[in-house]
Image (cartoon, rainbow, N blue to C red):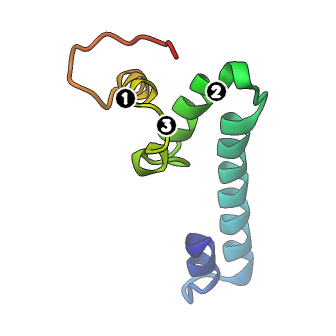
Amino acid sequence: MGKIITTLSQNGKTPTERFWEVRDRIVKEGRILVDCFDNHARSKLFQSLVSMIHCDVVGWEDLTGFSDELQQSLRRATGDDAPGTPVFLEL
């Protein structure tokens, strides 16, 4: 939301330019949300979490309540683990 407010407050652009820039940002962020939450189901929890991590919707600090095993699997799946570690998509 802060980036949108900043864009709307820019002095160097016309109101029309600011409008279209904000509109494009909202559409882009909307696509990110659809990618993360579309077809949300318990059976797709792991894939949804990986998508949310990649889109910076969820950070590692948000996952502290989850099991260590799930957190490690997510780290491997997102590449935020030691190089060369195989990816296992398991719960």
User: Would you say the residues marked 3 and 2 are in contact, meaning their CB atoms lie under 8 Å apart?
Assistant: no
The residue to which callout 2 is attached is: 45
Q: Identify the residue under disc 1.
A: 75
Residue 65: image location, x then y, percent:
49, 43
| Point 46% across, 26% down: residue | 70
Which is more N-terminal, label 1 or label 2? 2
| Residue 19 located left or right of residue 90 | right
The residue indicated by pointer 3 is 66
Front-lying residue, 60 or 28: 60
Q: Distance between the residues labelled 2 and 1?
A: 15 Å
Foreground tag (3 vs 1) = 3
Q: How crowded is mark 1: few (under 14 residues within 10 Å), some or many (20 or more)?
A: some
Q: Earlier in the sequence, mark 3 or mark 2?
A: 2
Label 2 SS: helix
Identify the element where label 1 is drawn. Answer: helix
- Label 3 close to label 1 by CB (< 8 Å): no
* Crowd band around label 3 with a 10 angstrom C-alpha radius: few (<14), some (14–19), many (20+): few
Instruction: Estimate the x, y position of residue 79 in percent, counting from the top left.
Output: 34, 26
Q: Is residue 76 above or below residue 67?
A: above
In contact (CB < 8 Å): disc 2 and disc 1:
no
Amino acid type of the residue that numbered disc 3 sits on in the rendered structure = Phe
Q: Residues within 10 Å of mark 2 (few under 14, many from 20)?
A: few
Q: Quadrant of residue 18?
A: bottom right
Q: Distance between the residues labelled 3 and 1?
A: 13 Å
